[in-house]
Amino acid sequence: MTVDDPVQQFEAGLAKLEATYPQALEACSDEQSLRAANARFVGPQGELTALLKWMPKLPGDRRKELGQRANAAKGGIERAFAAKLAGLAAAEREAELSGPSVDVSLPGRHARAGRLHPMTRVVHELIDVFTSLGFDVAEGPEVELYEYNFDKLGFPPDHPATDMQDSFFVETGLNAAGVLDPAKARTVLRTHTSNMQVREMLARKPPMAVIAPGQVYRRDDDVTHSPMFFQIEGFLVDENVSFANLRGVLARFAERMFGEGTPVRLRPSYFPFVEPGAEVDIGCMICRGWRGDAEARARQSQCRVCKTTGFVEVLGCGMIHPVVFQHAGIDPEKYTGFAFGMGIDRIAMLRYGVTDIRLLYENDVRFLEQL
Ligand code: FA5
């Protein structure tokens, strides 16, 4: 374009542009070439952009009219671009819909295999251990009569475990004045699986050897205590059963679950439904402080699971109290028996190296996949 005749040059440039853009845009067969063609006219280096830069050089009496023509051409390009873009998208969609419905060239979707929750796996292992020793498996209700959860096991009425602050009551058995009404049922979420001793002893005749796994509920909540947790009850009733038999069964259990050489420690303890009674601790598998070397002791001194003691309490046990036999109609002069109640969550924690019981119930797949 020369400066001699800017109007003529401008008009010629505009006419060329008006003649070429419709065809140039229409000929494009994909979005990329359409955008390139559009830029040829209205991009920073485009033909129309260059023309518009000449506007100030046009004589005043023609500037308005030529400016309007240039703007009309710009509008025309924009509309043609938008229409073509929409047309290309519609054609692409149409091709997709009318094409084959399955694209066999796409990579396959990987189906993630599920597996049993670590708690379920431990329950199954425990059932294996005890059934191989001759125990039957029984199941019972989680909403339990107060009588079966406490009274028939010899709990005195003022025992702290029977406190309304420690147990979850379903029906309190209290009347409107807050006084105990014998006509009203009292039910609790069972606080332990020992209710199954009562139920099974009422239903069977000795000899019997039974385990009863299941969920239990207490008002507890910290790194080793959950408000809902799992226990497995085990008991054996026959003539001449001794504490040594109990000790033998527990030794076998520790060996099967944690390997030979696992330390098992019995401490005298009190439960209303056994005499004598004991609590059983297993060497902490998280810190293994019981190994006694300097490294183990250092780990033990930091261990949250065993609270730096090197041992974790996993169960209560003892010789079944005669009063339980009497409540179940079994002759305590003829029969003796042992019973134990184990916290399965603790076993799972030791087994899988879990340092906070709550992780077992949060159902975070990233955590569960590690176990
Ligand atoms: C009992 O529940 C007795 N029924 C056990 C028993 C049965 C004794 C038969 C004698 C004869 P204890 O309250 O100690 O006892 O609980 C037993 C085990 O459950 C504990 O050793 C512990 O491993 C586990 N446990 C107790 N409370 C919780 C809790 N809140 N969360 C997880 N585990 C728990």
Image (tube, grey):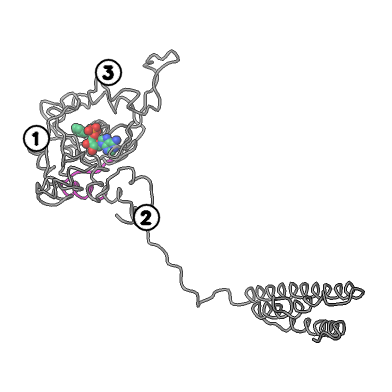
Quadrant including the N terminus: bottom right
Image x and y of residue 166, in percent: 32, 27
Residue 52: quadrant of the picture = bottom right
Instruction: Look at 31% across and 56% down and name the residue there.
Output: 370
* Residue at image mark 3: 158
Quadrant including the C terminus: bottom left
In the drawing, does residue 15 fall left or right of residue 132?
Answer: right
In the drawing, does residue 40 fall left or right of residue 202?
Answer: right
What label does residue 366 carry, if any?
2
Q: Nearer the viewer, mark 1 or mark 3?
A: 3
The amino acid beneath tag 1 is Phe
Image vertical order of residue 244 relative to residue 59, above or below: above
Circles 1 and 2 in contact, beta carbons < 8 Å: no
Image vertical order of residue 318 relative to residue 24, above or below: above
Mark 2 residue's CB less than 8 Å from ligand 1? no
Camera-side residue of 353 and 170: 353
Q: Residues within 10 Å of mark 2 (few under 14, many from 20)?
A: few
Q: Is residue 307 visible?
A: yes
